Amino acid sequence: MKLIWLVFFTFVVALLFNSKITAQKMEPTTIAQGQLDAYNNQNIIEFLSWYADDVEVYNFPNELVYKGKEEMSKRYINAWKLNPNQKAAVTNRLQIGNTVIDKEHITGRSSGIEANVFAIFKIENDKIVQVYFIRE
């Protein structure tokens, strides 16, 4: 009987421990970096996994460009098709609560033109829910 209780107790403790681990939230900077890595690898499935289904993308301060992962997918697949060597490097990153602000340097465009952009990521429940871009 003691063995049964020991096994049961061990199982319950393991279950509680594992649920605490899975319930922990990722750091917002981890999420921002994850989407950047997927962007640079031009991996659309991994890239979209960092975003909420109803993500909203804006030109700063409040011009809605598009909404949703389906539209995001179309736009990024097309952009990567036109610019297969395009990469973004973070030159500065700030975090304030659940908001991450990246200053990015974009290279590898087919046009040869490099660019700097600020990307502001608002994160909820381990997903990016809004992105604001400030372009030069």
Image (cartoon, helix red, strand yellow):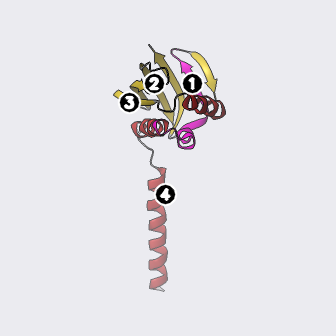
Whether tag 3 and tag 2 are in contact, CB under 8 A, the answer is: no
Task: Classify mark 3: helix, strand or loop.
Answer: strand
Residue type highlighted by circle 4: Ser
Q: Which residues are magenta?
A: 40-61
Q: Secondary structure at mark 1?
A: strand
The residue indicated by pointer 4 is: 19
Badge 2 local density, few (<14 within 10 Å), some, or many (20+)?
A: many
Residue labelled with disc 2: 119
Q: CA distance from mark 3 to mark 4?
A: 35 Å
Give the residue furthest to the right. Answer: 70
Marks 1/2: CA–CA distance: 10 Å
Q: Earlier in the sequence, mark 3 or mark 4?
A: 4
Which is in the foreground here, disc 3 or disc 4?
3
Q: Is tag 1's residue or tag 2's residue first in the polypeptide sequence?
A: 1
Q: Residue furthest bottom?
A: 1
Mark 4 or 1, nearer chain start: 4
Residue placed under numbered mark 1 in the picture:
57
Counting from the top left corner in percent of width and height, residue 48 is at 56, 39
